[in-house]
Amino acid sequence: MSNQILVLGYGSVGAATVAALRLRGTPVRVAQRSKPANLPPDVPFTPCDTLDLASLEAAVAGAAQVVVALGFAYDGKFWQDVWPRAMQNLVDVCAKTGARMVFVDNLYMYGPQTEPLHEDVPLSDLPRKPAVRSEVTRIWQAAAGRVRVAALRAPDFYGPGAGPQSQLGDLAFGALAGGKTATLVLPPDIPHEFAYVPDFARGVVSLLDAPDEDFGQAWHLPCAPTLTPRQILEIGAAAIGAKVKISALPPWSLPILGLAMPILRELYEMRFQFNRPYRVDSSKFAKHFWGDATPFEIGAVKTAQWFKDKAKDSA
């Protein structure tokens, strides 16, 4: 039987997962609409449109497991159209081929919370993006019995290679590495959980190796002990000799600024994730797999150094 892994989507987490699988010699290939410019030459690539059932079925053929690390444009109205269709196609194709699915997920579906998030928090129908993620969750949950799906959920991510998609990416660590002021949408002094991209990939691989009884459920990825964005940036900046200068956008300004930058308008909807301490309970995963998440003293340093090296290369 084939042990080949198909990774759908080659963003930060998809790329890190491919790297982790290649390191241990697991056959892996990548599929998405267009071939990534940074894809290693020895990794097979298949063009694939997840919204086209025939295209998706052709890409999944021969794969024992599928890692869904897709990213659609950050637009709530667009999500309402594409995410349910994509997940339904994924469920149908994996059910037909027998492939297991590991779904790289976020935590939007829980809505506003005041306690650490755990896997049994009820799904939220708060529009728009939380409701979409809840709908997607219900689709794969309803397919239990005909397809094996495990969802790996994590908060905002950071790490080497995590650029504009990361709250601590280009505009934060990237800016500091270039001697500029970091711009944050997150309040700099409210504790906020962050997942390190290599840990995300490690979590995906743990589920790929897990038995079937660990599927049909969601898992929360372990993260380093919660710090504030300022504290995380200070750890990384100190390692590269950079000064920490931060400009924070107040939440009330996001709809106004969103007239020029639509992504800020989209982030305003998600302000419940950053206008209060944001913590995640990952004890379930830690007890079953591992809980030694990369500390910020390592992750933030490696991230800052990656952005510093990137700035040197582009100078």
Image (tube, rainbow, N blue to C red):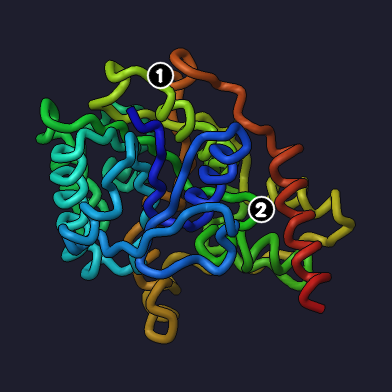
Q: Amino acid at mark 2?
A: Pro
In front here: 8 or 118? 8
Residue at mark 1: 284
Q: Residue at x 51, y 29 (%)?
A: 222
The picture places residue 153, in percent across and down from the top left corner, at 39, 38
Spot the residue most to the top: 287
Pointer 2 or 1: first along the chain: 2
Above or below residue 210? Residue 155 is: below
Spot the residue most to the bottom: 260
The picture places residue 274, in percent across and down from the top left corner, at 46, 51
Residue at mark 2: 160
Q: Amino acid at mark 1?
A: Lys
Q: Is residue 221 left or right of residue 70?
A: right
Q: Is residue 247 left or right of residue 289?
A: right
**In this rendering, which labeled residue sits more in front, label 2 or label 1?**
2
Assign a secondary structure to mark 2.
Answer: loop
In front here: 284 or 111? 284
In front here: 248 or 218? 218
